[in-house]
Amino acid sequence: MAQKIVIKGDVVSSESLTELRTIENGYICIDDGRIAYVGDALPSDYADAELKDFSGMMIMQSFCDMHLHAPQYPMVGLGMDLPLVDWLDKYAYPLEGEFKDTEYAEGVYRRLAKDLIMHGTTRVSIFSSLHTDATLVLMQELENAGVTGYVGKVNMDRNNMPGVLEETTEESEAETLRWLKECERFKYIKPILTPRFTPSCTDELMAFLGDLSKEKKLPVQSHISENLSEIEWVKQLRPECKEYWDTYNDSGLWHDRTLMAHCVYSSDRERKAMRDYGVTAVHCCNSNTNIESGIMPLRKMIDEGIKVTLGSDIAGGDTLNVFEVVSDTVKTSKVRNVYDSWESSHVNEKEAWYLATSAASEWFDSKPGFAAGNMLHAIVLDDSELMRKTLSVEERFYRCFYKRQQNAIRSVWSEGREVYSYR
Ligand SMILES: [Zn+2]
């Protein structure tokens, strides 16, 4: 018999970019982890179901972090004085090299997986390092902690760090195949092909990955147009390609199951290609600010009909906490709007939260919001210690991105299971 559970509290659901649904004293009913009902009255057939009573607290969708680098977690806050390429050489690559040691990887990845869940992030798309075994350790640790989503073994057969972080084209291809075979044992974590970015991958490797994506219907994640000197570098490496995106498209890596981080300097033509091919942009405002890349024209990209999600981009980004990523997305959108002479409007909290939750739903075979049929992915947020006597649920929602009490997250649900609780 299906296990029926009722969760009671103030429900907040992101139905679309502009539509926030709030239900004070509402109910979410689940059957074997799948949402069957959301509303303000308890259906009679759930009268005897197990009740999780979070009255007075907000039940919100949990976060999707669609771009972060797991092996960079120990270097959060380091090297913020350097631009992208120098930052990679001086900090990121030497650290990633250490993940050939799977024991070290296990300790870091166990901590990361736990921290993701504790911060209310239940769905992810993550870069590992080039090491197959450490990548499998990462997938296992995420699965153990209750995280759902995608992990990629990084491919990088050129411009890497000899003796520290390197693989030949042959090794990269063979290890990718070995990794894909091993991935079959995971239930909640799936593989995603991960050419680091064009400067790191030969044409041959890119073409191999493009063929693999097509043959095995595998999704792809990478970086694009993050920094001006990076774009110049790509032009030198691939002079036959008109623009950065052509390097991915030429190899079959540019399609509707592709995630591209950054897009800060994507041209009109590149943005049009994102929309036409259904490529998803991952906006990482913390990282783009920290390593002085720039500010993506978020409002413009949304208005143009491009699919946009959010990423913490650890460790260019400095926080795993997506509440902070949401508020920083709003702040950087405001700054961009000022420097664009107020020609548009900034993205607000309701919209940024949509990008951090429902916007990624198609990546996880679900519908936006707490829709019936979705597996439950939720956070219970306690704000009872904050003064709120006369506030509406909507006002409390807007506040939570800026002010939260200690241990505010009381419960986290991932794929219909309660994976964290603080009672
Ligand atoms: Zn990145």
Image (spheres, helix red, strand yellow):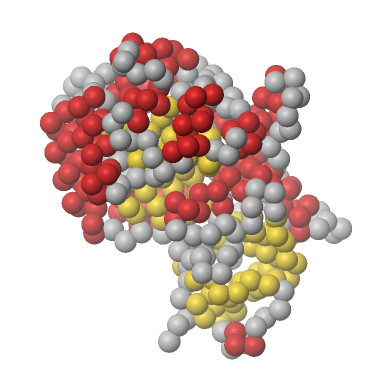
Q: In the shown orientation, is residue 154 left or right of residue 115?
A: left
| Camera-side residue of 363 and 174 | 363
With respect to residue 332, does 215 lie above or below?
below
With respect to residue 90, does 317 lie above or below?
below
Residue in view at x 58 percent, y 65 percent: 371
Residue in view at x 16 percent, y 28 percent: 169
Quadrant for the N terminus in the image: bottom left
Residue 401: x percent and y percent? 67, 45
Quadrant for the C terminus in the image: bottom right
Residue 363: x percent and y percent? 44, 51
Residue in view at x 23 percent, y 23 percent: 202
Identify the residue at the far front of this view.
276
| Camera-side residue of 222 and 284 | 222
Query: Can residue 385 be spotted in the picture?
Result: no
Residue 397: x percent and y percent? 72, 52
Identify the residue at the far right of this view.
390
Residue 287: x percent and y percent? 51, 28
Residue in view at x 17 percent, y 44 percent: 177
| Camera-side residue of 75 and 239 | 239
Query: Can residue 150 be spotted in the picture?
Result: yes
With respect to residue 326, does 287 lie above or below?
above
